[in-house]
Amino acid sequence: MITRKVLQNLFNLALVTPLSLTKNKSGYGSIRLLSSISQNKPKTEVNDKKSTPTSTENLDSNTENNDNKLTSLFKNIIHGSPEIREEEKQTHSKIIARGKYVHELQKHKIKPDCVEDYIKLVSEHYPRIANYPKNSVHLCGSWQTEIGDLDSFFHIWEYQGYTGYHETLNRLKNDQHYQRFDKELRPMLQNRHNQICLEFAFWATSPPTVHGGIYELRTYELKTGKLLEWETHWKGGLECRRQYCEPVGAWFSQLGALNFVHHMWQYPDLESRKLTRERAWEVDGWAETVFKTVPLIHKMDTCILIPLPFSPLR
């Protein structure tokens, strides 16, 4: 049982070092120095002679109100405000994800002497998989690396949720064409890996479009627990970049290697990329975005990609 005396001591301590629980962008309680909490301190009359007599009922009522305020303050200090506790119950993906689709990001590292055969093989089978009406999947795009990890290919698939992912894979396992494709593919591979990702709510994946030019895939491995903070800053920073370049898409990993963020841009050529990035620094807010997001990153990588002829985004 918390006695009134204990609560009063805590309240007095808060007045000596004014503290207030506030809600930051990541949804967690943080402690900040705010002198305004001193307003919670019960006021006393300066001139006792002018004060009117207070009845016993009023004194009891004031005492009860003060006890309630002290109890509430104590709970907020120890447990956080009710609003913050409610938001913390939600998963990060529910807070920041668009929630409509599940994306699979595939990377195939091909033996150098098999690159041409690989392109021919996926050009035949990937459109067939994407266009089969019973498969709950669309192919966003397929690209070959021009600058970065050479002889590597990226494919981004868009499933109708996790249900669509399972339905599609189960169908492919029993598909003779896919079994033949997989058998021919394996000898060409040096290695391969994938991630299951979700879209950011503020950054939907571009529909099939013919742009021409080059694509840049930027990958960030964030420090553990920094995804919400990164999303908060990038949501504002994206508007700075949009003035000069429309983004293709952005995803964060849910299965496979975790704490990864990927985003993709399209440019006519490398010179246009250079000018676009330089202009972004002239927009108010972009420098602040970079300043706040860089400390959240553990490692980063970028590669320049060329779309394959059958890629919906090209």
Image: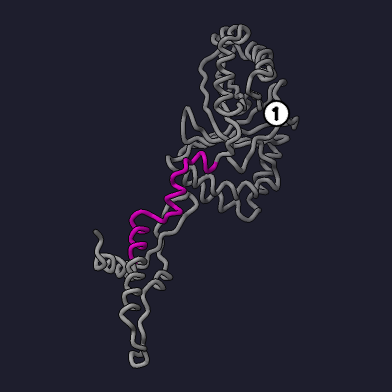
Q: Which amino acid, by three-letter code, is at mark 1?
A: Leu
Kindly indicate the quadrant of the structure image that contains residue 6. bottom left
| Position of residue 99 in the picture relative to residue 69 (left or right) | right
Residue 56 drawn at (x, y percent): 30, 80
Residue 97 drawn at (x, y percent): 56, 39
Looking at the image, can residue 188 be seen?
A: no
Residue at coordinates 47% horizontally, 48% vertically from top-left? 87
Q: Quadrant of the C terminus?
A: top right
Residue at coordinates 62% horizontally, 46% vertically from top-left? 238
The residue lying toward the viewer, choosing from 215 and 310, is: 310
Label 1 crowd (10 A; few <14 / some 14-19 / many >=20): many
* SS category of the residue bearing label 1: loop
Q: Quadrant of the N terminus?
A: bottom left
The residue lying toward the viewer, choosing from 243 and 60, is: 60
| Position of residue 45 in the picture relative to residue 275 (left or right) | left
How many numbered circles does the render carry? 1
Residue at coordinates 33% horizontally, 63% vertically from top-left? 71
The outermost residue toward the bottom is 49
Residue 280 drawn at (x, y percent): 65, 48
The residue lying toward the viewer, choosing from 26 and 281, is: 26
Which residue, given by chain and number where applicable, does mark 1 sit on? Answer: 313
